[in-house]
Amino acid sequence: MSPHDPPTLLVLYGSQTGTAQDTAQRLARQAQRRRVQVCLSPLDGYNVAELISESLVVFVCSTTGQGEPPDNMKNFWRFLFRKSLPVGSLSRLDCAVLGLGDSSYPKFNFVAKKLHKRLQQLGACTLLPVGLADDQHDLGSDAVVDPWLQAFWDKVLSLYPTLRNVLPLREDEPLPPSFTFHFLDGVSEQTEDRLWTDPPSSAPSPSQPFPARMLSNRRVTEASHFQDVRLIEFDITHSHMEFTAGDVVMMRPRNSAEDVRQFCELLRLRPDSVFTLSATGSAAVPSRLPRPCTVRHLVESYLDVAAVPRRSFFELLASFASNELERDKLAEFSSAAGQDELHGYCNRPRRTALEVLADFPHTTAELKADYLLDLFPEIQPRSFSIASSLQAHPNRLHILVAVVQYRTKLYRPRRGLCSSWLASLDPAEGEVSVPLWVKKGSLRFPVQKERPVIMVGPGTGVAPFRAALQERIAEGKTANVLFFGCRSESKDFYFRTEWEDMRSAGHLVLFTAFSRDQEEKVYVQHRVRENAALLWDLVANQNACFYIAGNAKQMPASVRDALKEVFQQEGRLTAEQAQEMLEAMERTGRFQSETWS
């Protein structure tokens, strides 16, 4: 490539929870500071056919669930892996791939590794080894991202020596905002999210969710139990929603009225002020915001002010600070050397962006509204396993929600945004509707009637298996085994009467593990070992499928180990053969897991 002016840098990202998007935005800001032309886009927002004429591209992508690409790069993924693409079609392209992953999942950074390999197959020149950031690292993904970005710019400077002569913008000079706010007088807002008023003709989607009426919001743990868990029922009549066992429902939570009030106070904004937005560069104005929009709607439904802020938040704040003490602290939190300090202040105690603003009052007072969408990411959709089947509950959708609340060294308890918001909604006090859409889940259940299914679902992990049991029993599939675990038979034994009814009808074999009801703790993996003969017969002789769902801490690995011990004990296999058998089951879809952290 000729050592002339650098081409436009294209930064494409695939992001599920916003982390890859944040990293891509960080790279784009670094380009702006170096006065390099840059274009930023989600992968599915880019016309992939144009890739053959690009010169310099960075792909930033995460991996979801079981090695799947994020939703906003699925179309790109399908296109790129077409067999018909000619081998040398990307020979003009210089590129690099940065992956964001979590090594506690088996398919760590699978998407980034596979993309890197595919780009090389198509003739692209990869400037750097694929970056494999790991959320499990003490300092999070930045431990890999920082040096990788530095190496990327070193490479770009060697390819385009003229860049060395460019004087970059200083770190403390704010970049222009992505959007400009135009406040309007005497205009009433068009508030609600874009929801249907007429019965829709197609299935709901992220851009057009269905406003499902909440019918009930019932606590299913005993009143004295430390954990508040809700069974929530929605009416989805006329929604065109279709789902099967294993699918998930998506929703966007809202910030609490108290957080909205405090945010507006700190930033000296009037909640009822009405504004429109215009883009200052190539970024599109968010289509989800009504035009015009109130400050209240923006803060309540769009800006993620109650999340733990990322490092980019501190970088941006530092560029506005004029108070010396605050500026020095923000600069430290923004630097590579200050990451341990930042983790101690922010990530470990789970301090929210709103609490950070309160800690930096001088800087907060100087914030301009124009920068709000640069400072705060968009509230991301949350997913819940659907806990009911349309065959048992037509026009209804159930979810089982553990209300997240825990303490850190901070005075106020930490609360999960979505679960706390859902728990606060009470249909007994007036009509409540929640905008929903449905997405295919990763669990797939067998179509063959006789094929047995073994399900291990402790705690709220049992939700997809309730849907599966309702669906399977309605279809006459009665070879079902469920391992359910919780703390106490009297406090958090979800759906007890339903399981007992299924059992007495001969439709379910149930094993329970109540970890705290006796001296020694008993978990689902212990029950798996105890029933080795039955499980071996089901798996080896009856071709059963085995499923795990629940919290991703130790449980999935412990259950896998227990199952391998069953294979060794009952099937007389060596440890290696048991491992191979489990891997073969995974490859053929006979062993599936859906876990969350």
Image (tube, rainbow, N blue to C red):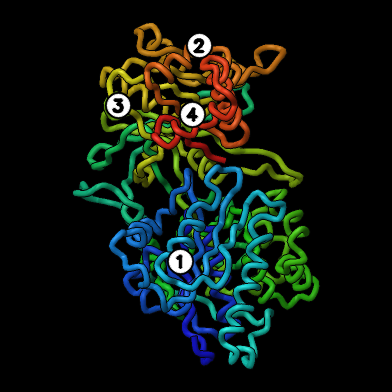
| Lower position in the chain sequence, tag 2 or tag 3 | 3
Observer-nearest residue: 578 or 309?
Answer: 578
Residue carrying label 4: 581
> Where is residue 509, by image quadrant?
top left
Disc 3 versus disc 1: nearer the observer? 1
Q: Distance between the residues labelled 3 and 1?
A: 50 Å
| Lower position in the chain sequence, tag 2 or tag 4 | 2
Q: Residues within 10 Å of mark 1 (few under 14, many from 20)?
A: some
Q: Distance between the residues labelled 2 and 1?
A: 49 Å
- Assign a secondary structure to mark 3: loop
Residue carrying label 1: 120
Observer-nearest residue: 467 or 43?
Answer: 43
Q: How far apart are marks 1 and 4 (CA)?
A: 33 Å
Q: Which amino acid is tagged 1?
A: Gln
Residue at x 54%, y 74% (from the top left corner): 28
Residue carrying label 3: 393
| Lower position in the chain sequence, tag 4 or tag 3 | 3
Give residue 533's mark: 2
Q: How far apart are marks 2 and 4 (CA)?
A: 17 Å
Q: Which amino acid is tagged 2?
A: Ala
Q: Where is residue 374 in the image (x, y as percent from the top left)?
A: 54, 69
